[in-house]
Image: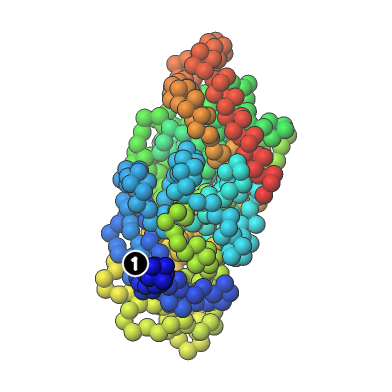
Amino acid sequence: MKKMFLTALLICALVLCTLVPAQAEIHLEGYPIVDETVTLKVVVAEANTSNTHTDMWALVRLQEETGVRLEIERVDSSVWNERKSLMFAANELPDIIIGSFSSDERSTYFASGQITSLNDMLPLMPNYTAFLSQFEAIERASLYDADGNMLGFIGQASEGKKALPGCRLIINQAWLDALDLSMPTTWEELVDVLTAFRDGDPNGNGEKDEIPISGGSSNAAQVFVTESLGISNNADGSRSNWYEGEDGSLQYLITSDLYKTYLERMRYLYSEGLLDNEIYTQSNTQFLAKGANMQIGACTAPAPFVLVGTDPEKYEQYVAFGPIHPEGAEPKQYFNEMYGANLYITKANAHREVTARLLDYLYTEEWASIVRGPQLGEEPKGTWDGQGGWYYVDDTNTKYAVEVPEEFSGVYYWRIGSVAPMILRGGMGYTQIWMDEVMSDTDTHLRAIFADTWQYTTPCFPQAYSLSQDESDELALITGELETYVDQMEVKFVIGEMDIEADWDAFQEHLKTIGVEEYVRIHQGAYARYLEIASKI
C-alpha cells in the first residue's frame, strides 16, 4: 500500500512538471536578460489610447535586446480612477502598473500586499540607482514609506528639467528695450518695470492696451510675488501653502505674517492695474488671445510660441524672467528635478529579477541610442525592411531619417508613443543629434532662453509626503472646508472686497473654528516623518 502511494505521488509530480512551464533562465549580467521570452503585462494610464503599443517598434526592439515582451493595456486617464479601483478590488492585477496613485492609495495597497516593496530589486539596477543618486535625498524620499520601503519607481525622467522648469516665467525683452529698462531683480524693480509697461506704450501701437502681468488661471501670477518673498511655489507655479522654518520644519503660510505681506503685494498689483484684473474670471483661451495680440508683458506660459504663436518675430521677443531676489537672500527657482513615483510592481509579478533588469536597461546609453537615434558616426542598430527604424541617409553617418510603418500616425507614436514618458524614455535623455535635427526652431528658442536659469533651481517645499490612514481620516473632516475658505478669502483680499488690515484678525479666527491648528499639527507630524526618511537614504 505504501509503495502504491509513493508511486502515485511520483506520477502526480511528473504530471505537474509537464503542466507548469519551467522558469526562463535569467542572466544577471549582460543581454539578453533571458534566453526564452518572458511576457510582462503592463497597465498604463494615458490621455490618448488611439495607437497600439504592444507591437510598436520600440517594444519589439526592447524584446530583441532583452528577451522581455511587454503586453500593454492602455487605460484612458479619464477613467483611470475607476479602472484602478476595480482592478484592486477584484485583485486582477498586471505585473506592472504605470499611473498615478495618491499617497493614501499607495499606503493602502501596500498594506494589503498588492503593491510590493522594491528594495529587493535595487541590487539588480545599478544604472537606475546611479541615476537616482544625482537627486537630493529630500526628493528621493518621496519614493519611500516610513519603514524604508521603496514603493514606486520613477517611470519617467527628464532630458533636462533644470533647463526647462515646469513653471516657466517669461517677459517681453522688446518691451524692456523699448523703454530702456533692465531685467528686474528685486520686488521694487519689478514694480517699476510693470508700471512702465502699463504707462509707456511698449508695444508701440499708440493705445493703452498693455497688460503688465496676466495668466490663464487664477493662480498663474502668484509666482511673481512668491519669488519676491522667498515662498516656494509648487511645480506648476501655484503658491505653496507651506514654508520652511529655520530648522527645516513645515510651517503653515496662511496663518503667518508672511502671507499677509503676500496678500498686500498681490493687492497692490491688482489695484494698480499691473495684474490683469480679469485673471480670476478669464479662460485660458481668452488669455492666449491677449498674448496673440501682443498685449502681455510678463506671464507664466509653457513657451513663448504657445503664448503668441509661431511667428518668430513675435515669440523671439520673449525671454526667461527671473528669478528675482527676496530681500537679503539668494534667488531661487523652485522646481522638482525628479518626477515622483509612477511605476509600481504588483504581487502578481512572478518575474521580479527579470523586471528589475529590464527597467535598469532603460537607463543605459545603449537603450537611449536605440530608441532616440544615434550619436554621430555610430553604426545603426538593426535592419530596416519596411517595419520602421532610423537609418543614415549619407555615407558619413552624420544625418539620419526615420521610417514609419503605415499603421502608425507619426514618428512619435511609432517610436515610443504616449507610453514613452512613463517607461521607454528612461533616464539618459535625448542624444544631441536628435536635438539638432528633430527639435523645431520654437523648441530650440525655448531651451535657449532658459539655459541660464537652471543654476537657481531648488526643490519645491514641501515634498509630497505621505499620510497614514488615521491622519487622512482626521484631515478629511477639515481640509475641504479650510482650503475652500482660504481660496475664497484670498480672492476677496486681492480684489479689495475685503480689507487686509481690517479683516485679517477675523480671517485668522475663522480659520481656528474650522480646525486649522489640528490641520497644521497633523501635517507637521507627517512631514517630520518624511524628513526622517530622507535622512536615512
Residue situated in front as seen by the camera: 322 or 295: 322
Extreme residue toward the front, this view: 1
225 shown above or below 428:
above
Residue 130 in sight here: yes
* Residue 55 figure quarter: bottom left
x, y percentage for residue 36? 43, 77
Extreme residue toward the bottom, this view: 395
Q: Identify residue type, mark 1.
A: Thr
Residue identified by numbered label 1: 54
* Residue 79 figure quarter: top left
Residue at x-position 41% and y-position 71%: 3
Residue situated in front as seen by the camera: 126 or 283: 126
Secondary element at tag 1: loop
201 shown above or below 25:
above
x, y percentage for residue 385? 33, 84
Residue at x-position 30% and y-position 57%: 49
* Residue 86 figure quarter: top left
Residue at x-position 55% and y-position 30%: 241
Left or right placement of residue 408 versus residue 272 in this view: left
Number of callouts in the render?
A: 1
Residue 38 in sight here: no
x, y percentage for residue 169? 52, 44
x, y percentage for residue 328? 73, 34
Left or right placement of residue 441 versus residue 502 in this view: left
Quadrant of image for the N terminus: bottom left
Residue at x-position 62% and y-position 25%: 258
The crowd level at tag 1 (other Cα within 10 Å; few <14, some 14-19, many 20+) is: some
User: Which color scheme is applied?
Assistant: rainbow
